[in-house]
Image (cartoon, helix red, strand yellow):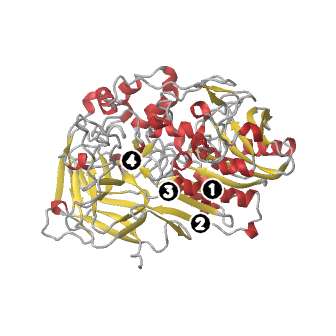
Amino acid sequence: MVRFRKLSFSLFSAFPLSLFLLSSPVLAGTSAQAGAATAAAAADSGDEPKYGLREHYTKYEYRIPMRDGTKLFTAVYVPKDGSRSYPFLMSRTPYGVGVQDQGQSHYGVGYYPAALGPSREFEKSGYIFVSQDVRGRYMSEGRWQEMTPHLKARPEQGEGNESQDMYDTVEWLLKNVPNNNGKVGIWGISYGGFYTSASIIDSHPAIKAASPQAPVTDLFMGDDSYHGGAFMLAANFDFYSAFNEEKNPTPLPRRWEEFDYGTEDGYEFFLGQQTLQNITGKLTDKQRALLVPTIEHSTYDEFWQTRNIAPHLKNIHAAVLTVGGWYDAEDVQGPLTTYRSIKKNNPGIYNGLVIGPWSHGGWARNDGKSLGNVGFDSKTAEYYRKNIVFPFFEQYLKGGKENASPQPEAQVFETGTNVWKSYASWPPLQAQARTLYLGGNGRLTWQQPPADAPAYDEYISDPKKPVPYIGYAATAVPREYMVSDQRFASTRPDVLVYRSEVLEEDVTLAGPIQPSLFVSTTGTDADWVVKLIDVYPSEYPSGKNSDDKLNDVPPPSLAMAGYQQLVRGEPLRGKFRNSFEKAEPFTPGKVENLSYSMPDINHTFRRGHRIMVQIQSSWFPLVDLNPQTFVDIPHAKSEDFQKATQRVYHAPSQYSGIVVQVLPAAKP
């Protein structure tokens, strides 16, 4: 889930806006996914004549009845060429299927979006495109639920089940829309990815292909709301300040209004409020309605467990292609969890995984050639749209499966070397677990530290001076933060830094990262943030420079030599070291082991680079502040926030390290 920041695509920030734009036309002008509209429009900027939707498609609007009598608003775009039959390609969204015109969202058959499918290839090939307001949102009837629980013992009046709503919609479409070939596909990004996953449980037999993309899967376990038990503050505040409920059916809101922080520096804004109660106090009752429950439910309780769709992904009969981005700030874990759950529960179907070097939804709207200062050498998103997702739907919705070349199960982009790789499964079976050990004097090695090495490293963590997550000012979460330069943090006294020697050969890591730390604190709670970093050589091509020829003193260019690229970072709220369902305090000074899993990576640390690990106890305001006293953080008072001395041990029987999955060296 995310919302917008500005009206221009170039100003979009990560969480707050990308999800919204990729799932709704309220700003971007598409009844399916806004990013695809931008990509398709860009494709039309070449030499070939511009492709006009009005010329080739007729739009209809329906209110489709569900089994309980609730009617869901649905827009259908039918090819004007009636000489052949077409499959349906659906998207379901909570963000409204209205079309953007003059800065506002509009319903009505006269309004057409800029584009319809995941790319222009779909429109030219011919599909019946279907976009639906989910139950309880915008022009649909019924009662909306955040991350609709698949099973609810006592549903309230108007509440429904996404799988049943999809089933009933498909039944109606097959009977009432002419020239269909009896096959249905569904796709969606972020929240739309969740609705895709939820819609194929106990799937209708006509659903032949589905692509959940950046699917929100388990909000507490590494998706939008919590990572390692720590609340993702900046992203959720920005999103929920705009994502509110309206009495439906309604075309409102026609546009979302952004929150006025009163500053361009989110670090300054959130630190000035300090406590979560003060922060949420800056919002109206309407803005707090959806946000506060996500804060109040600060453990993995029934509220979150019932909204976890992963265990319910069963009885799926469609081919599934799950898509994600290595640098997705909102839902990097969701695609991995979805892929693994479908594979476990649905043997016999095609269950594919695609992960590229993309931010949230970047495969739909960007070229995918770079992210921030980090380059990937080719237009990876364009490659995906033309060579992966389009052939997938064409194969299962139009062509005979027996005549098509089977797609690999896992198609993943290997960053560092910047190449696409295919595997029979993910993680690759050939990857072997190895441990990078933290040692004295900031050493990072594959060997345990010597017995006479210093027993621990320590730092003072002060909640009043937290470690920022980026080295520049921003309010929402910038999309590039997941590859951002970490040199600003490595010089702070409250950040521990461990680095390897210069690598003599490439080292490729493929799979999850699992810190295993021996720690102690003088407080009764603490966050432990682990960051895996690629340190560029001391000689390296310079960064991007402006092409403008100015007759003034220019700003300094970014030196990529020594760049400390974040590869993966993840917090663990220490009180959840044994269970996310039950918090436990630390005993001051007592050494304890923390072991947890970070989202997968597929990255090669090149010859001449170094591997770095940074450890800290705040990551602000990406993550909310831990008072470092054992309290209920949503209700913490200012006096609860206390300094603490944190130690990380690397003595015999207390070796701290990072377990990684290493691929065998590639043969030339």
Dot 3, how many residues are within 10 Å of its Cα: few (below 14), some (14-19), or many (20+)? many
Residue 618 relative to residue 367: left or right: left
Identify the residue at horizontal 17%, vertical 71% (top origin): 450
Position in image of residue 598 (x %, y %): 40, 56
Can you tell which of label 2 and label 1 is closer to the viewer?
1
Task: Give, as a three-letter code, the residue at label 3.
Answer: Gly
Q: Amino acid at mark 1?
A: Val
x, y (%) of residue 402? 75, 70
Answer left or right for 89 relative to 93. right
Q: Which residue is mark 4?
A: 372
What residue did someone put label 1 on?
389
**Mark 4 falls on what kind of element?**
loop
Mark 1 lies on a secondary structure that is helix
| Residue bearing the label numbered 2 | 409
Report if the CB atoms under discs 4 and 2 are less than 8 Å apart: no
Within-10-Å neighbours for mark 1: few <14, some 14–19, many 20+: some
Question: CB under 8 Å between callouts 2 and 3?
Answer: no
